[in-house]
Amino acid sequence: MYEIMSADEAIRLIRDGDCICVNSFVGIENPVELHEAIYRRYMRMQSPRHLTIVSSAGFGVWDEEHNAEGYIREGAVDRLICGHFGAMLSTKKLVLEDRFEAYNLPLGCISHAIRAQAGGLPGALSKVGLDIFVDPRKEGPGINRISIDDSLVKYVEVDGEDFLYYKLPKITVALIKGTAADRKGNISFDDMFMSGDALSICQAVKANHGKVIVQVDRLVNTPSRPRNAIIPGCLVDAIVVAEPEERNEAYKALTGSFEIPYEDWSLWNEKIDTVSAKQSNNNVVGNIIGRRAAKELRVDDIVNIGIGLPEMVSRHTRKNGMLDMVTLTVESGGIGGFPVSGEVFGAMIGASSVYDMANQFDLYDNGGLDICFMGALEVDKEGNVNAHRGPGAFAGIGGFANITAKTPTVVFCMTFNTKGLEVSQKKGVVTIHKEGSIPKFVDKVASVSFSAKRAIANGQKVLYVTERCVFRLTPKGLKLIEVYPGVDMEKDILDRLPFEVEK
């Protein structure tokens, strides 16, 4: 039977050595009050300590001084297992300093491994991750020198087919953020941008005889409608009521509490960009790449668009009238709306449906998308892509590996080089005024996020769209298939590549 507690009382349920699973998505829907209570208790009593924290998509709030950053920095955590570290500003730096063990697994594979525990299974099989960094035959999931646990990902063969087997430590504590708890303890997510893996996490914790702690905005007397109760009260141990921070009106568009017609998506997106202080990607290079990449879309396509340069595809899809002819998706579970970015990445404007994250990755893993548009840090002569690890920096693979593993058409949106690149375009003619100092086409990528060899074996169409040309993946490597007007093929492309390409 659940109890209503303060955050400080609820955190006493956490023991030294527990494995905590946080239901959140990059920077949204974090149970902030619960994290802050852990920090207070740890600073007062040096407990709980020796924690392991699991999170499919990470659990930061874009602030080094809030959420889990404090108690992680002070030493309460021995091990992190996450799909993405982007919103965890101090934690992702400490990872590279070997302060604790840290492992990066594909977001969807963590989600599915959590669901496996919910069903009493030790782990989950997947073809996602084969031949990329997480494959133990390559690098494995460890991010730093002390992360040597080889039990998390194993290469196995089943009925003559190769798979990776993802196995998480037993989850013993759930930290969840919901909207309301009714008098039966049922938890609804009505005002939330997503529910993530909340139910699977709670079921897994209960399978392991652990504790479920849920932070909600309010208590309600009227029981939730059965379909609206995401977590049944019988799975909940502690409910903490924490009055939510006042949200700008723009964010209400992301809860699905009112209908937003297609013609208003652009207006609401601009409002959200304004309040989230997101820098506009409305630049020449981004427009060239986004306009060209958007030409690959077809009517009725089911689509995923990554953050960064690929977001320009959304803008040009809207401009050319295709946006209401395709279905956009986002990893957190939204489908049929317009994904937003910045601090609220993972939410959608005008979503048709928002379901569990594990179900979304079922769609991605089974090839249910028609096309995806993703970013790239570097590409090598074979067509392999590194999208998760730069020099001295680390964000994580996120959903990238799941999304690109089986999607029939994969379009990488990237500049030819970076840091100082200056380009203009007038009447369709591209002029390169200054080259960037850091090449993005290299002889060998530092770490493999996308395997060209596996893409060829899967029969995927793979394009690399830049501000000056387009390459296509072939069994021999990259083939130059398009040079934009104004670009000198020899001087601006071939002479700047460290390897030869087909023409």
Image (cartoon, rainbow, N blue to C red):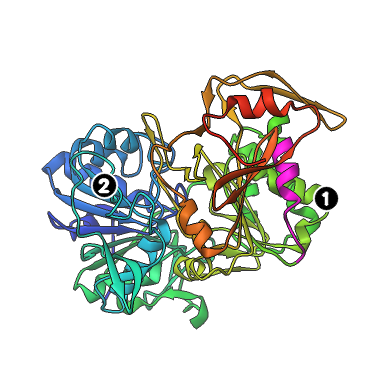
Please name the amino acid that badge 2 sits on. Gly
Position of residue 2 in the picture relative to residue 310 (left or right): left
Residue 23 sits above or below residue 102 on the image: below
Q: CA distance from mark 1 to mark 2?
A: 43 Å
Residue 291 magenta: yes
In percent of width and height, residue 379 lies at 51, 39
The answer to whether any part of residue 283 appears in the image is: no
At which x and y percent is residue 251? 61, 50
Q: Where is the C terminus found, in terms of image quarters?
A: top right
Instruction: Please state the extent of the stretch shown in magenta in the rendering.
Output: 288-299
Give the residue number, with chain letter if any, for mark 1. Answer: 320
Residue 487 is one of the magenta-drawn residues: no
Most extreme residue toward the right, as rendered?
A: 427
Asked if 34 appears above or below 503 in the picture, the reply is: below
N-terminal of the pair, mark 1 or mark 2, is: 2
For residue 150, what is the image quadrant? bottom left
State the image quarter where residue 208 is shown. Answer: bottom left
> Which of the two residues, 41 or 111, is positioned nearer the viewer here?
111
Q: Nearer the viewer, residue 370 or 485?
A: 485
Residue under label 2: 142
Residue at 77% of width from left, 63% of height from top? 325
Q: Position of residue 51 (x, y in %)?
A: 18, 51
Vertical relation: 224 (above or below) 255: below
Badge 1, how many Cα within 10 Å: few under 14, some, many 20+?
few
Q: Secondary structure at mark 2?
A: loop
Q: Nearer the viewer, residue 285 or 22?
A: 285
Residue furthest top as drawn: 434
Residue at 21%, 65% (x, y): give it.
172
The amino acid sitting under disc 1 is Asn
Is residue 99 rendered to the left or right of residue 187? Answer: left
Q: Quadrant for the N terminus, please.
A: bottom left
